[in-house]
């Protein structure tokens, strides 16, 4: 198994959102630490490329929709976390994962991606 952890805290607190290409992974978890406002989870397969092209990247992705994840801390499913801390698990069957909220609203935001090699 190959895994990688992305500490996206700085980008999230600066831009109020972060987008990752999770297409090549089998498992994705998002660890939100001490959120002071709502953190939402969204997904898209639309990389924003010109119709007929496959050249795209996370920065141009659009048409995001709510993405249902399992709150491993509470044992429930949700598309957002109102506040506090939790770890969410997501199926990696989409191209892009977007975590959005309010700037300067989390102590830490870690995204762990793993694939079976």
Image (cartoon, helix red, strand yellow):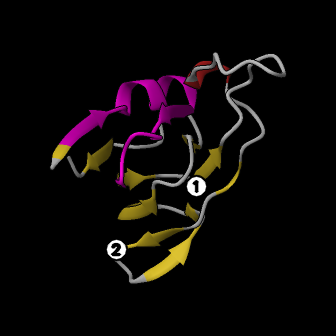
Q: Which residue is mark 2?
A: 72
Mark 1 and mark 2 lie on one chain; the one further toward the N terminus is 1
What range of the chain is rendered magenta?
3-28
Q: Is residue 10 above or below residue 115?
A: above
Answer whether residue 106 is magenta in the image.
no
Does residue 26 sit above or below 72 in this rendering?
above
Residue at the image position 46 percent from the left and 30 percent from the top:
13
Residue at (59%, 39%) from the top-left corner?
102
User: On the rendered structure, is 20 left or right of 67?
Assistant: left
Counting other residues with Cα less than 10 Å from the Cα at mark 1, is it few (<14), some (14-19), or many (20 or more)? some
What percent of the width, then of the height, locates residue 30? 37, 53
What x and y, as percent, mark residue 111?
34, 44
Residue at image point 58% right, 42% down: 100
Quadrant in the picture for residue 2 = top left
Q: Are marks 1 and 2 in contact (CB under 8 Å)?
A: no
Label 1, on which residue?
38
Q: CA distance from mark 1 to mark 2?
A: 17 Å
Q: Quadrant of residue 79?
A: bottom right
Q: What x and y, as percent, mark residue 5?
A: 24, 39
Q: Residues within 10 Å of mark 2 (few under 14, many from 20)?
A: some
User: The residue tagged with tag 2: helix, strand or loop?
Assistant: loop
Taking depth in this image into account, of 23 and 85 the one nearest to the observer is 23
């Amino acid at each position: 198994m190959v895994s990688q952890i992305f500490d996206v805290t700085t980008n999230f607190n600066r831009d109020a959102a972060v987008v990752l290409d999770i297409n090549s992974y089998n498992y994705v978890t998002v660890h939100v630490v001490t959120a002071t406002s709502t953190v939402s989870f969204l997904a898209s397969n639309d990389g924003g490329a010109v119709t007929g092209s496959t050249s795209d990247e996370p920065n141009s992705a659009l048409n995001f929709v709510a993405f249902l994840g399992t709150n491993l801390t509470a044992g429930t499913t949700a598309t957002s976390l109102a506040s506090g801390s939790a770890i969410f698990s997501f199926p990696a069957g989409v191209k892009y994962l977007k975590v959005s909220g309010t700037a300067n609203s989390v102590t830490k935001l870690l995204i762990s991606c793993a694939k079976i090699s």
